Image: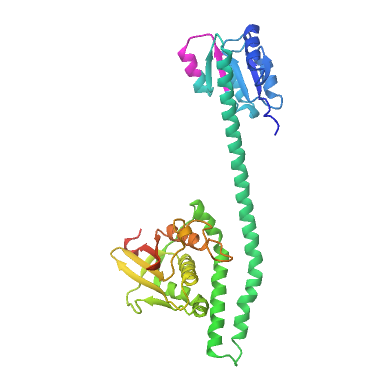
Amino acid sequence: MSPPRKPKVLIIDDSPESLHILVEALRDCCAPFVAKDGRRALELARRPPPPEAILLDVMMPESDGYEVFRQIRQIESCREIPVLFITALQDVEREQQALAMGAVDFLRKPIHPAVVRARLMTHVELARARFRLVEQNHRLEEAARMRDLVERILHHDLKGPLGVILGLPELMMTEDNLTPEQVEMLRLIRSGGNTMLEMINRSLDLYKMEEGVYAFEPVALDLRPVIERAAAEYLPLSRSKSCPILLSPQADAAPWRVPAEDLLCRSLFGNLLKNALESSPAGSPVTVALRRDGATVEVRLHNRGAVPLPIRERFFHKFATHGKPGGSGLGCYSAMLMARVQRAELTMQTSDEEGTSLIVRFPAWTDFP
C-alpha cells in the first residue's frame, strides 16, 4: 500500500521569519506553498489541486487576513477548506470574529511548531473524513437510484410472462370437461397470479418502508375476508403437508375492522401463513384466531413447530433463515415492515413444548387515528 499523500497546505504570511518557521514545521507532513500577500494567495488557492488547509496571518499589508479569507471563500473549490488564523495579537474579539466567519482554529504567535503541526493535521484529517463521507453518500444515492431503476425494469419484464399465467386459467375454465376441483385449482392460480401482479406493482413500497417514507393510506379493513383469501392461496401447500388452516371464530356477525391496507395485509398474512405451514410438522393444523381486546384486534397464528434456536433472537431480522433450502429470510422481515407501517405490533412466541405463535395486534378502527 502506498503511503498517504501529503496534503497541500497554503501558508499566507508577510513575515519571512514566520514563513520559514511554518514551512520547516510542516515540511515532513505536508506540501507547503507560501504567499506573502492576498493577491498571491488567491492565485495559489485557484491553482488545482486546491489546498487541503490554509494557515492565514491576520495582520498583513494591503488586505488583512479577514478580507483575504472572504475572497478565498468565494472560490468554489475552497469553500470547505479548513482555515486556521495566525496572529500575534491577544485580542478575544478578533478570535471570535475569525471563528464566526468560519475559521476552524486560531493560533497565536510565537509559533510552536509541534502544536501547529498537530492542530493542522487534525483539521486536515477531519476535512478528509468529511470528504469521504460526502463521497460515500453520493455513492449510496447513486446505488439507490440504480436500485430503483433495476426494480422498475424487473417489474416491466416480469409482467410479460405473468400475463400469460393469468390468461391461461381464463381460457382453460371455458372448457366443459373440467371437474369442480380442477376449476377451483384454476381459480386459485388466477387469484395467486393477480396477487403477484399487485405485489410486483407495489414491491418498491418495501424499500420505502425500510427508509421510513412509505405513505400509509388506511381504510376500515375487515381482517377476516383478507385472511380467508390469504389462506385460500396457500391451500395447495396446506394440502400437500396435510396441515389444515383452521380459522376461528368460524362465524362472527361483527366485522373485524382495523385501519389498514388490503394488499399489505394480504401480503403480511400470506407471509406468516407460509412460514407457519413450512414450519409445521406434517399432519398438524395451523390455527388462526381472531380476538378483540378492548381497543385492539389480535390475530394469532399458531403451529406446532418450534423456531430453531439459532434464529430465535433474530427471527424478524433481514435474511434470518435456518434449515430451509432456498429460503431467503425475507418473509418474516417484510411481514414485520408491513405490520409496523400499519401501526400494528408483530411478535413471536416459541418453545419446543408449545410450538410457535405469531401475534399481530392492530388498533381497532374506532380508535383511529
Query: Residue 129: x and y, percent?
Result: 58, 33
Question: Residue 188 in magenta?
Answer: no
219 sits left or right of 8 in the view: left
- The answer to whether residue 225 is seen in the rendering is yes
- The quadrant in which the N terminus is found is top right
Asked which quadrant contains residue 42, the reply is top right
The percent coordinates of residue 210 (x first, y second) are 50, 53
Note whether 255 is above or below 339 in the view shown: below
Q: Is residue 299 left or right of residue 211?
A: left
Corner quadrant of residue 38 = top right
Q: Which residue: 36% across, 68% down? A: 257
Please tell me which residue is depicted at 61% across the width and 42% down the height of the picture.
138
Taking depth in this image into account, of 40 and 294 the one nearest to the observer is 294
* For residue 365, above or below residue 119: below
User: Which span of residues is magenta-colored?
Assistant: 83-97
Q: In x, y percent, where is residue 254?
A: 32, 74
Q: Can you name the residue that lies furthest to the bottom here?
A: 177
**Residue 66 can be seen, yes or no:** no
Image point 56% across, 25% down: which residue? 122
Asked if residue 225 is positioned above or below residue 121 in the image, the reply reads below
Residue 89: in magenta span: yes
